[in-house]
Amino acid sequence: MSVFFERLFWAVILVLLVGVCILATTCLVYAQVTTYDNSPYNYKNSEYNYNNSPYNYNNSPYNYNNSEFNIYSPNNIYSNQGQREGYVVPNQNRVANYFDNNGNRVGYGK
């Protein structure tokens, strides 16, 4: 009976080690792809930050600088076919927020 428990013990240890290795590899791969400065989990990039929110008037589609009716706005983004795709608004954190025509935040960048 003790041989059974000894083998069970080493099997559990082996499974735990394999799990830790997989988790560590996954974390390392993610860390190589995204730094904290570029991560959506960083508050300055988060959509929950008021500076990035469409409820902030600077980012709102109702702001004339972001309006699709203002054809001279520097914030407008156009497709290769000349169709307005949305607008971009930089904030004080040097993050550029990209919004679609409805005011939904679709991305960010530096």
Image (tube, grey):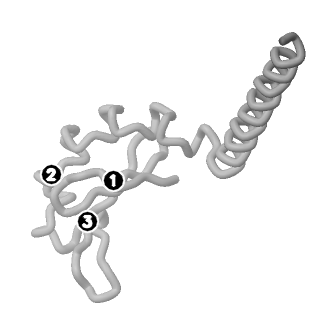
Q: Earlier in the sequence, mark 3 or mark 2?
A: 2
Residue tagged by mark 3? Answer: 86
Q: How many marks?
A: 3
Q: Identify residue for label 2.
A: 63
| Relative vertical location of residue 33 with respect to residue 81 in this rendering, above or below | above
The residue sitting at the top extreme is 2
Q: CA distance from mark 2 to mark 1?
A: 11 Å
45 relative position to 29: left or right: left
Front residue of 77/5: it is: 5
Give the spatial CA distance, label 1 vs label 3: 10 Å
Q: Amino acid at mark 2?
A: Asn
Q: CA distance from mark 3 to mark 2?
A: 13 Å
Mark 1: amino acid: Val
The residue under the point 83% across, 19% down is 4
Which residue is denoted by mark 1 in the rendering?
Answer: 89
Is 59 or 25 nearer to us in this picture?
Answer: 25
Compared with residue 100, is residue 1 higher up or lower down, i.e. above or below?
above
Give the quadrant of residue 76.
bottom left
Q: Amino acid at mark 3?
A: Gly
CB contact under 8 Å: marks 1 and 3: no
Cβ atoms under marks 3 and 2 closer than 8 Å: no
- Local packing at callout 3 (Cα closer than 10 Å; few below 14, some 14-19, many 20+) is many
Q: Nearer the viewer, residue 71 or 105?
A: 105
